[in-house]
Image: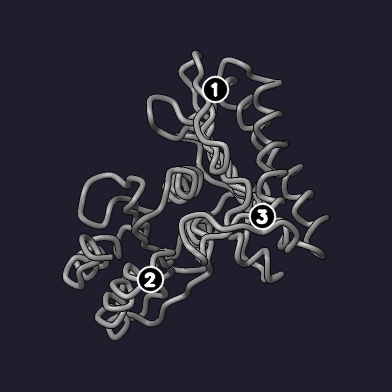
Amino acid sequence: MPVVSEPLDDLLDLAEELARRAGALLLKRLADPRTEVSTKSSATDMVTEIDRLSERLIVDGIRAARPRDGILAEESGELEGSSGLRWVVDPLDGTTNYLYGHPGFAVSIAVERDGRSIVAVVNDPVHSELFTAVSEGGARRNGVPIRPSQAVDLGTALVATGFAYDPARRRAQAAVLERVLPRIRDIRRMGAAAVDLCSVACGRVDAYFERGLEAWDLSAGLLIAAEAGASVGAIGGGPAVPGSAIAAPPALFEPLRALLVEAGAATHA
């Protein structure tokens, strides 16, 4: 395994610190999460005061330690930088789960260089699990290396996915699942893309796919899955991008991608 350069170690240390602090904030406020809830793109796309407080903690920490870095954060948008690095922040991935006190939410922080993630941290505070990765340095859960499942048979694969907020897109995604579900073991829907991707990375599910996500949903989780040993890409082919992502063990990746394309997931979900 290549030695991680000191700059990546510094970035990882800061990302870990901020993800832990934000996770502690989420847990502290979990008993009363429904204060100041509003909606964004639809009635099911919610944002809370806690989302904003968590994001402020992270963004302020980045700007204090690395004022020249750019930041893309879900709630506050883009802050330009001059260093060539950009932090991509989801302060609360899985807001609906959080509002209901349901496990399945996380803090997701990635650092990108030239549009590619080089450092990733996903903190699942309910389960006290901190997933980390650095480019060409492997992926870990609480400091222990992780690997995806060794599944080779699509028919026995447990596959995670998620659904859009828009009702019309949900109908299209349900139509895709109608064609996919009979040809796999089962579907899991956690409600947090970063958690799903970390579940692929450590073998809790065999694979994951979803359309319609943003960079902050995917940047950290995709690097963690890839560094753990999963194959990642877009459903229709090529590298994973905001809007289309699939992650699976190498033996399952192409069979699952082909099934999803056949079912219409590349264009209609």
Q: Which residue is mark 2?
A: 167
- The answer to which of 126 and 71 lies nearer the viewer is 71
Going from N to C along the chain, the mark reached first, 3 or 2, is 3
**On the rendered structure, is 187 left or right of 110?**
left
Which kind of residue does numbered mark 2 sit on? Pro
Any part of residue 196 in sight: yes
Q: Residue furthest bottom?
A: 182
User: Disc 1 residue type?
Assistant: Ser
Secondary structure under tag 3 reads: strand
| Mark 3 or 1, nearer chain start | 1
> Mark 3 — residue?
48
> Label 1: few (<14), some or many (≥20) within 10 Å?
few
Question: Of residues 184 and 36, which is closer to you in this image?
Answer: 36
Q: Mark number for residue 5?
A: 1
Give residue 99's quadrant in the image. Answer: bottom right
Element assignment for label 2: helix
Question: Quick one: label 2 or label 1, which is nearer the N terminus?
Answer: 1
- Element type where label 1 sits in the image: loop
Which disc number belongs to residue 210? none
CA–CA distance in space, label 2 to label 1: 46 Å
- Image coords of residue 147 (percent x, y): 49, 56
